[in-house]
Amino acid sequence: MNQGCNMDSKKQCRSLKLMPLVLGLGILISPDTLVRLGDFMGNTGWTGLAMLTIATALFLLLAPALEKQQAVRKKPGVNTFFPLILKFSATLFLSTGVLVSSGFVFNEVFIYWFPNFGFAFTLLALVLGIHLAGIQAALKAQVVFVSLTLICLLSLIIPGLAAPGSTAPAFPDQMPGLSVFFVPLLLWVGVDLGALSPGSGKTGYHKISNALGVTITLAGIIFLLWGVVSILQVPLGKLSGSSIPHLKTARAIMGDQGRYLMGAVIIFGSLSGVNALFTACRMTAAGIAGSGFLPRGVDRYVPFVLAAGTGLMMAMGLAGSENLEIWIQAVFILWLLSYSGIFSGHRKISPAAILIYTGSAMLLFSGEAWQLKTVYFLVILITAWIPGVLLSLKSSFRKK
């Protein structure tokens, strides 16, 4: 997929330029991220802005490593299928959550008589239909989804900064536990999807680390602006622990019109996140198949598997289960830990890696359900290792 920008058309070159940005922002502007950000601001107040700034700087330092992480292994090993299984897990759990949430928002904000799950399945069918049209259609759709999400979000941020806000103090009554200050690390999880975009390799249109740097910086600005708006417009107690802090903030800014705009952000942001994950799974599978570790052309069937799995989980009611968010947290913490290089054979221990190790441990072993979260974390990790172990054993037997 890392082919350079052709001379076919300047328009194609300009579109390739956007690919790392729109794929990298896919999960970052999804409603799940906005919920996590709103809850974090409610727990920390103005202090949280400093933590968001530090996290932005950390990920900027990690940008070159995130580029290398996408390289496909030439020899089979225990971690050969780790990136694919990790993305598959994230896709199934996150898609189930955000699509059903979008269904409820569409029902409550726009058309009350439309079935919640009917709309969720409609969005899932839309993403599958886009992928049936080909990977290029999915990439073009991603530009549309991300653009619409950002336009609607900025339409809330600008008046939110200008309008008089809440008179409640913007510092919490008591400081939260230490683990809360590592939550910003999870906000950028998924930014590395931008490294999978076509034409973004070192031999392509531009170095992907530069594109990732732009994506990380833009996301950091958006998080800071929305964080400021949130604590200006809504008392911290109403943000902390809420499952809809973004909707509360939007309503405080512009009333019902704000609800409509945030409803659009949630729907388009869900499509952005789900489509980015579907695309990333396809590209990762194609890369592994290109190295001979999977059958050629297997990536064409990836959208069907993901859509069937997500649809089954929604039909079984997992979206209404308290465990779904724990699964999402577990897979996101594992994804965050992968940024340290621990699963890619990178042995250099840098200050950034130490911070990720510490943050991952604090996030994993804290909270009300940390034991269950740890079990889910290990289940995903072991599942990701098993195919690589079997492939390695098969390879070693052949050599003998």
Image (cartoon, rainbow, N blue to C red):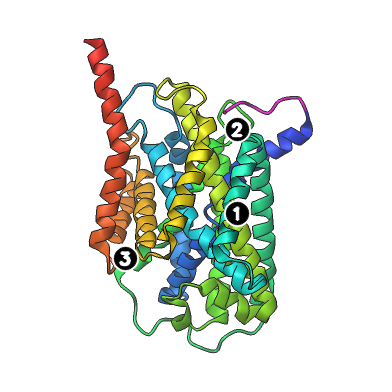
Which numbered dot is residue 101? none
- The magenta region covers 1-8
Q: Which residue is mark 3?
A: 179
The amino acid type found where label 1 is placed reads: Leu
User: Which sits in the foreground, 118 or 173?
Assistant: 118
Distance from disc 2 to disc 3, alpha carbons, whole Å, reads 37 Å
Nearest to viewer (mark 1 / mark 3) = 1
Which numbered dot is residue 123? 1
User: Is 140 on the left or on the right of 213, as rendered?
Assistant: right
Q: Is residue 3 magenta?
A: yes
Point out residue 312 in the picture as x, y percentages from the top left corner.
Answer: 45, 51
Comes first in the chain, label 1 or label 2: 1
Q: Which residue is mark 2?
A: 198
User: Which sits in the foreground, 302 or 214?
Assistant: 302
Looking at the rendered structure, the secondary structure element under dot 1 is helix
Marks 1 and 3 in Cβ contact (< 8 Å): no
Looking at the rendered structure, the secondary structure element under dot 2 is loop
The amino acid type found where label 3 is placed reads: Ser
Residue plotted at (64% across, 53% down): 146
User: Which sits in the foreground, 398 or 332?
Assistant: 398
Overall secondary structure of the magenta section: loop
Nearest to viewer (mark 1 / mark 2) = 1
- The quadrant holding residue 166 is bottom right
Residue plotted at (68% across, 54% down): 147
Distance from disc 1 to disc 3, alpha carbons, whole Å, reads 35 Å
The correct choice, above or below, for 97 with respect to 310 in the image is below
The amino acid type found where label 2 is placed reads: Pro
